[in-house]
Amino acid sequence: MFDHFECVKVELTDGIAWVRMNRPEKRNAMNPQLHDEMEEALTHLEVDPDAKVIVICGAGGNFSAGQDLKMFFRENEGNPLGRKTSQRAANRWRWELLYSYDKPTIAMVEGYCVGGAFMQLLATDFAIAAEDATFSLSEVNWGILPGALVSKVVADAVLPRHAMYYCCLGEAFDGHEAERIGMVNFAVPAAELEAKVEELAHKLMAKSPRVLRATKQAVRNVRTMDFGQSYDYLAEKGLAIRVGDQEDSYNTGLRQFLDEKAYKPTFEPFKTGTMIEKK
Ligand code: ACO
């Protein structure tokens, strides 16, 4: 299905879709074609039942060196239509698609993660970095702003002083620092990176996809709601996830915990296939 791609590589193994920005000779700098292919790949995978968790990563040991300064910027100068089309495609997959994606997403960061790559880094639900990865909001060094939504998503993700410091200085930082400031969930030795990502993906796959989707939407959406809106939204969302829950997870879980004493939800995911059929 993705054989015609040149700038993106998709591998689907054991429920995990590894979606790789694939221009290793250019450190996976993102050109317009890569943006189009990422959008196509993510749109297909969102409805592919074999893809349970999506990992956004890069080929050749790097995440991405940001927007392609030649093909995305320079070659679109004097071409307003090309520029607008490329920008829209870039923003669609890096933000609109990933931010509200139906399935859990993980960014796996190694090597360089620069400039525009912070959009997909921060749009994913989780991020794990190699300790020796190199992050840089380098825009200031190019005489441009952290544009599209980069300034916004960095300012939303970390404490104000960290956002100001790294956006204004463009100083490079490593995986440890990315973890310290909350840019990634955790940093691990490079040799363990893939295994840690797989471990997280398998934990996510053990959850009810319906509950997981609603939970991640809720965590994102309540950030911009007041308390009254949050109470109302969460109550309605809570009801909504029970509709069509074929496992009746809530009642089955209560029975197993309270009556059968067979389940400790603090430590284990809901056991699928354990509902008692109603006569
Ligand atoms: N755009 C276009 N081409 C790029 C980019 C980029 N963002 N990053 C790397 N490349 C190209 C280089 O031009 C080079 O091409 P060539 O082989 O045809 O000469 C190739 O990728 C390898 O790059 P090197 O610089 O030789 O690789 P090195 O490993 O020494 O350095 C690094 C990697 C640090 C990422 C460096 O290439 C760099 O600083 N790139 C710019 C990154 C950047 O600032 N990105 C933000 C752009 S602005 C934005 O995203 C909004």
Image (spheres, rainbow, N blue to C red):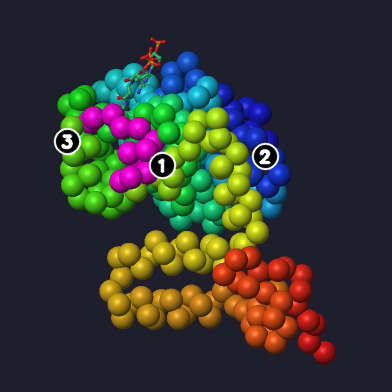
Ligand 1 placement by image quarter: top left
* Amino acid found under the numbered disc labelled 3: Cys
Query: Does residue 176 appear anywhere in the picture?
Result: yes
The label shown at residue 121 is 1
Span colored in magenta: 170-181
Query: Magenta stretch containing residue 180, yes or no?
Result: yes
From the image, tell me which residue sits under label 3. Answer: 168
In three-dimensional space, the C-alpha distance between marks 2 and 1, rounded to whole angstroms, equals 20 Å
What element does badge 3 sit on?
A: helix
- Above/below status of 54 relative to 84: below
The label shown at residue 158 is none
From the image, tell me which residue sits under label 2. Answer: 12
- In screen coordinates, is 165 left or right of 80? left
In three-dimensional space, the C-alpha distance between marks 3 and 2, rounded to whole angstroms, equals 39 Å
What element does badge 2 sit on?
A: strand
Counting labels gives 3
- Above/below status of 244 relative to 42: below
* Amino acid found under the numbered disc labelled 1: Leu
What element does badge 1 sit on?
A: helix
Furthest-bottom residue in this view: 279
